[in-house]
């Protein structure tokens, strides 16, 4: 990590004219990157600050009550498989 000598904020690596430079996003100070030095920007989130956005749970195990519901779900499933198959074959030919 490198900090700006003018304002003390974090310097961020950017590309300009095929070269990598370090630039301060606050004051605009720029510095050329030294040869053979790798810069990598990483971040982490503490476990207690993470937010669960979705959960997978098991079904109730109850069978569908009506034949109509089963038929509708079967149709949705067939349309899904057909669409998925078309998308897969379209990606391979690109």
Image (cartoon, grey):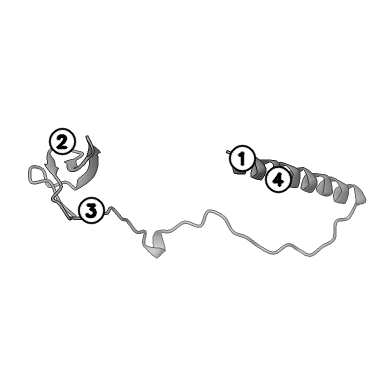
Is the residue marked by circle 1 packed among few (<14), some (14-19), or many (20+) residues within 10 Å?
few
Q: Nearer the viewer, mark 3 or mark 2?
A: 3
Residue 47 in the image: x percent, y percent?
40, 64
From the image, tell me which residue sits under label 4: 85
Alpha carbons under labels 3 and 2: distance apart: 19 Å
Q: Which mark is residue 28?
A: 2
- Earlier-in-chain disc, 2 versus 4: 2
Alpha carbons under labels 1 and 4: distance apart: 13 Å
- Earlier-in-chain disc, 4 versus 3: 3
Question: Are the residues tagged 2 and 4 within 8 Å (C-beta)?
Answer: no
User: What number of labels is visible?
Assistant: 4
Element type at mark 2 = loop
Q: Could you tell whether 64 is left or right of 88 in the image?
A: right
Element type at mark 1 = helix
Question: Are the residues tagged 1 and 4 within 8 Å (C-beta)?
Answer: no
Q: Residue furthest front?
A: 93
Alpha carbons under labels 2 and 4: distance apart: 50 Å
Q: Which mark is residue 39?
A: 3
Question: In the image shown, does 17 or 64 lie closer to the viewer?
Answer: 17
Residue 74 in the image: x percent, y percent?
83, 49
Q: Nearer the viewer, mark 2 or mark 1?
A: 1
Question: In the image shown, does 94 or 47 lie closer to the viewer?
Answer: 94
Q: Which mark is residue 93?
A: 1
Alpha carbons under labels 2 and 1: distance apart: 45 Å
Residue 60 in the image: x percent, y percent?
76, 63
Question: Are the residues tagged 4 and 3 within 8 Å (C-beta)?
Answer: no
- Earlier-in-chain disc, 1 versus 4: 4
């Amino acid at each position: 990590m490198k900090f700006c000598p003018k304002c003390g904020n974090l310097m961020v690596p950017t590309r300009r004219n095929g070269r990598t430079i370090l630039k301060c996003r606050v004051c605009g100070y720029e510095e050329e990157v030294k040869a053979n030095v790798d810069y990598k920007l990483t971040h982490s989130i503490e476990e207690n600050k993470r937010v669960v956005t979705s959960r997978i749970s098991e079904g109730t195990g109850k069978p569908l009550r009506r034949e109509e519901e089963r038929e509708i779900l079967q149709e949705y499933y067939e349309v899904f498989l057909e669409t998925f198959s078309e998308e897969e074959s379209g990606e391979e030919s690109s």
